[in-house]
Amino acid sequence: MSEGVLESIRRVLGESGTERDASGLPRAVPDSTEAVASVVGLAHERAWRIRIEGSGTWMPADAPADLVLSTRGMNQVISVEPADLVATVEAGATIDTLARSLAERGAWLAIDPPGRPERTLGSVVATATSGPLRDRFGPIRDHVLGCTVVAGDGRVIRAGGTVVKNVAGYDVTKLQVGGFGAFGIITQLNLRLRAAPAADVTVAAFGERDPLTRAARDLAQANLELAACELLSPAVAANASWALVLRLAGTAAGVAAETERVRQTTELAWAEVSAEAAEGFRRNSARAALGGPVTFRLGVLPYGLDEVLDLLAERVDLGLVTAGPARGGLRWSGVASPAALRHLRTTVAQREIPLTIERAPWSIRHELGHFGAYREGIGVMTSRLRQTFDPGGRFQVALEGTGGSP
């Protein structure tokens, strides 16, 4: 069947748009939304299972499929409008490529997602993997004005901006953010920008975990204008102690004033770090999510963070942990069995804390799902959404899993 799939795709995309992946599976590399729609429409007709990929740096490429569809052929920054603070980007463009293009125009996309710089924007949006800048600038969905998506039967759906086409009453853009590709293949994004900050300063304090988390809560209560406030485990901080790392961005006068307020609000020994060291913290934080075969995030609130960290120490470990002690949220990476993950998900669900598996081998994703059945009734809604946007069930994405219910 593999050879027949490859030949069929070649007739649609030509020789340059087709290849085989490392396992020999046919891979389509379309260079436009229309080409993606043609490939997906053909797959829908012939009942081929599709595995969606970006640059292949985030999710393991192991979901069983008849065809791989990569977005890396759509890698252009189509337009940047600094005056309007809007950019239109193809989904296969990388974080690093977009950042360089925006910097030349004095603009900034205020996200710092986990992973490598060559990770694609489509991957970041599809998985909704926010970084520490979420504290001030909001989660990924707040940066997405609209998108173009190809549904599982080849339909092209455009939402946001000047063109809005809802499907069965759903907000298509919000549905795609964090949908892990279950509701369509994102091919183009309209993004909200900000002016690049005139000053960008990072300060850090080291010590025992609990005093750092208390200090972070004090900073939150004082309503400081922090761009980010991140707690790093010793392995991530590359230090013998835990680290609390603050990023302040804005005008030079504003950053200087807020830095002084940080020192006055807490009793920690803050040290302003060099630009090189600040970049090292950000790089370590981003790559910590790739440090183990399993990565999950917890929607924990600040006052529940210490308790959840103690729970993780009992059930898994505290090796590669990053957390938002001022505004909430935690990301963990390491080795964990399906049984341990299921037990942990059940335990935190009782505290109304969702556990999302961001990346893991297919065996774990398939069994537990990215989300699991966190609340009653979610499964029915998800099934209806998938039937609407992928009526033939072509996309190989495990949202709920086969045995992940708490």
Image (tube, grey):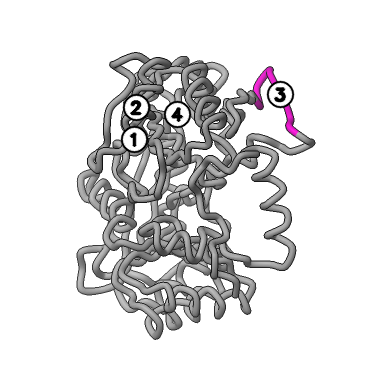
Which labelled disc corresponds to residue 164? Answer: 3
Instruction: Choose mark 3 or mark 1, whichever is in front.
Output: 1
* Residue 91 vs residue 83, the one in the foreground: 91
- First-in-chain label (4 vs 3): 4
Which part of the image, by quadrant, shows the C terminus? bottom right
Q: Three-letter amino acid code at disc 1?
A: Ser
Report the span colored magenta: 159-167
Give the crowd class for mark 2: few <14, some 14-19, many >=20 residues within 10 Å: many
| Quadrant in the picture for residue 92 | top left
The main secondary structure of the magenta stretch is: loop
Q: Secondary structure at mark 3?
A: loop
Looking at the image, is 310 positioned above or below residue 116? below
Which labelled disc corresponds to residue 91? Answer: 4
Which part of the image, by quadrant, shows the N terminus? top left
Task: Tell me which residue sits at (35%, 22%) in the image.
Answer: 7
Are the two marked residues, 4 and 3, in contact with CB atoms closer than 8 angstroms? no
Pick out the residue farthest to the right: 169
Residue 165 forms part of the magenta stretch: yes
Residue 200 in percent (x, y) is at 36, 41
Looking at the image, is 141 positioned above or below residue 204? above
* Residue 47 vs residue 78, the one in the foreground: 47
Instruction: Give the residue at mark 1.
Output: 2
Are the two marked residues, 2 and 1, in contact with CB atoms closer than 8 angstroms? yes
Q: Secondary structure at mark 4?
A: loop
From mark 3 to mark 1, how far is it between C-alphas? 38 Å
Looking at the image, is 339 positioned above or below residue 235? below
Which labelled disc corresponds to residue 6? Answer: 2
